[in-house]
Amino acid sequence: MSAAEANERADAAARRLLNELAGRGPDGIWSAPGRVNLIGEHTDYNDGFVLPFAIDRRTYAAIGTRRDTRLRVASTHAPEVVEVDLDDLDRLFPAHSGTDVPEWAAYPLGVAWALRRQAGAAGAGADIAIASDVPVGAGLSSSAAIEGAVASALGEVWGLGLDRVALARAGRVAENDAVGAPTGIMDQMASMLGQPDAAVFLDCRSLETDIVELGLAAAGLELLVVDTRVAHAHSTGGYRERRAACERGAAAMGVTALRDLTVDDLPEVAARVDDETLRRVRHVVTENQRVLDTVRALRSDGPRAIGALLRASHASMRDDFEISVPELDAAVDAAIAAGAIGARMTGGGFGGAAIALVPREDAATAATDITRAFAASAFRPPHVFTVVPSAGAARDA
């Protein structure tokens, strides 16, 4: 099934679910994409640089306004309907413990809470039905797609007048304070600001963005995603531990964030911190430089010039940040052996997906060889598919 067909199916599923929930059709449907991070992993919460792009896999939110203050959310991925009063959101968040609402519902409800807090007011209640074609737990930011779709929908029906960056901020607040995942803002910004055949070069400190043309099709390249089917969760300990190590390193160097360090500072870092903290810091510092080098290479020489940077990024995440897993390493190694220009894990790590930049004529062989490599290692079969850099959040109907 093509991405377009899968998106049409998700759109139709959201409409049906809203009709089951509210007994009528939607007042509108909004969608937002997942994202692939081309390069720049774990740099976002260190005030650094990232280069993600929106993908052609989307989450749909069908919304029906209500005359009362009840907010009801339903998802095709969950059996229950979760209902709260808008005035109760401040009781649920930010102290969400997982007992009052299921975790999946904390994403859309958290967005509503964040928007009310950010805008200072909100409209009436709403019924929201969610359906998605973004794989869950694959490192493609299915959570930001939910947040982007719901934030876009509520922002419009509540008449909040917020721009895309403000909506992205609301999504990050939901992720951090409602769900409890200590992530940066990269995912939400990519989902809101993505453009076709382009990546979003984001300065995570200033939130300044620049669109960088990728030119994959013109260069005869395809971007393969290898969903290892090893699920990860940002709200669990490994992610938190890496973030804490980065904060220790910044504190030891007397800087606000690791963004303020360069490769030339690493010998001094080594003299001030333990070996594990050094390796965590080294990954972030060198990854920031790789993002800048990738942007320059894309603009001067095109996408075929970035392979070595992608490979170096994966090695850094594997060896210094230690967030890869055997399935991700197998995917990267098999892709490169099959002719990929570059490959790396993408996302927060501890599972999820890898990406491979592959000449179009080698894409089918690469997908087959990756699947065979997984079988040879007795891993669960991966889901290998192509993604296309695509547009960000939008109203669809």
Image: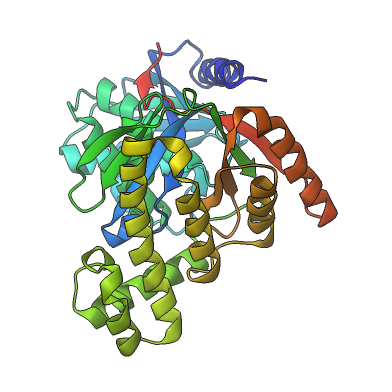
Left or right for 140, reference 48? right
Left or right for 79, reference 299? right
Residue 77 placement (x, y as % from top left): 60, 35
Q: Nearer the viewer, residue 116 or 144?
A: 144
Give the residue at x 32% y 58%. Answer: 289
Q: Quadrant of residue 377?
A: bottom right
Give the residue at x 44% y 36%. Answer: 303
Left or right for 303, reference 137? left
Residue 72 placement (x, y as % from top left): 44, 31
Looking at the image, can residue 344 be seen?
yes
Vertical relation: 32 (above or below) 239? above
Vertical relation: 32 (above or below) 96? above
Vertical relation: 81 (above or below) 259? above
Left or right for 365, reference 301? right
Identify the residue at the far front of this view: 301
Q: Nearer the viewer, residue 397 or 246?
A: 246
Residue 10 placement (x, y as % from top left): 56, 21
Q: Nearer the viewer, residue 396 or 153?
A: 396
